[in-house]
Amino acid sequence: MAPTQQPHAPANGREKGRFVISLDFEINWGVRDQQTLEQYGANLLGVRRAIPAMLEVFQEFGLRVTWATVGLLFFDNKRDMLAHLPSVRPEYADPNLSPYLVMDQVGENEAQDQYHFGKSLIERIRRTPGQEMATHTFCHYYCLERGQTAEAFRHDLQAAVTVAREQGMEMRSLVFPRNQYNPAYAGICEELGITSYRGNEHSWIYKERNEEQQTLYKRGARLLDAYVNLSGHNCHSLADIARSFPYNIPASRFLRPWSGRFAALERLRLRRILSGMTHAAQHGLVFHLWWHPHNFGVNVEQNIAVLRRIAEHYRHLQATYGMESQSMGDIAAELQRR
């Protein structure tokens, strides 16, 4: 068990603020049960443009980012993918949730099928300084859906850890697909080397739930919260994060994609994020921003412009308050050292 003592403040008496970014990198494995390729294919193919553009911004501004990546993306051909599938797989009450039932739809290699393979993108991410490769489970595993079990989750996470290790990566951070955190699985995560995960915002509108428990009311509240401060800044201290292990580094805000339909509200959306970052910098707290690369897959220029504005604000907060960019793994490693 990792140490749980409280972090010590730096010599100046004030903890510095931390800016964390985590990305849910999944391409079609994360949306296949909700969207068809006809509906969402442009976003998925656009990942090939969006990721290099994001990496340029991250490198320019020295942003350290956690890429929580579905294990099925670690391949460049179907033969290797099939050879690494776990022997125990989730048996969801809703069979549409399982990607294993549609493996016949996967192409033979990455050149032929850019919806289901991501090895070339992973290699590009790894070549960029400050980027942490993390896990989004192997098959985009849903931890709260009916029919899934602890045994199936263990096999799934083990498969993700194994394929990453074969390629020279140790998985230390985890993002639960659809934010379905299951506290019963914390011990399994620890056993398999996970030191941190991204928990949900503490407001009731973000409480973890399965797909059957989603309601239009809660979805609407989350949408409104992106523009108007309903749930607070959702910033957290290192002392709070250190109280449990694996460390819960909760989300602060989801970076919704730019939308022409809501263009008139862009100022409010950006202000909501920047004010939370400022609050964290001024009070020595952690601000955790997240999104999916496919969110930037269309309107790439507009989305990168928003990201650049956020990065510029981080640079201002870094110069003014000493705010620091850290990956989830950075924070976990710091807490373990303390």
Image (tube, helix red, strand yellow):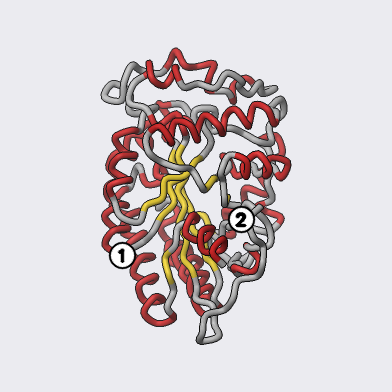
Q: In the rendered view, tell whether residue 209 sits above or below residue 104.
A: below
The answer to whether residue 214 is seen in the rendering is no
Q: Residue furthest top?
A: 104
Q: Quadrant of residue 72?
A: top left
Residue 212, image x and y in percent? Answer: 70, 34
Tell me the amino acid under the disc marked 1.
Phe
Q: Residue at x 40, y 32 (%)?
A: 166
Residue 167, image x and y in percent? Answer: 37, 34
Label disc, if present, on residue 61 of the rendered structure: 1
* Circle 2 or circle 1, nearest the eye: 2
Q: Residue at x 32, y 52 (%)?
A: 54
Q: CA distance from mark 2 to mark 1?
A: 26 Å
Q: Quadrant of residue 178?
A: top right
Classify 10 Å Cα crowding around label 2: few (below 14), some (14-19), many (20 and above).
many
> 272 and 286: which one is in front?
286
Residue at mark 2: 247
Label 1 residue SS: helix
Q: Quadrant of residue 284?
A: bottom right
Question: Could you tell which of marks 2 and 1 lies nearer the N-terminus?
Answer: 1
Residue 155, image x and y in percent? Answer: 60, 27
Q: In the rendered view, tell whether residue 300 sits above or below residue 19.
A: above
Q: Is residue 118 left or right of residue 184?
A: left
Picture quarter with the C terminus: bottom right
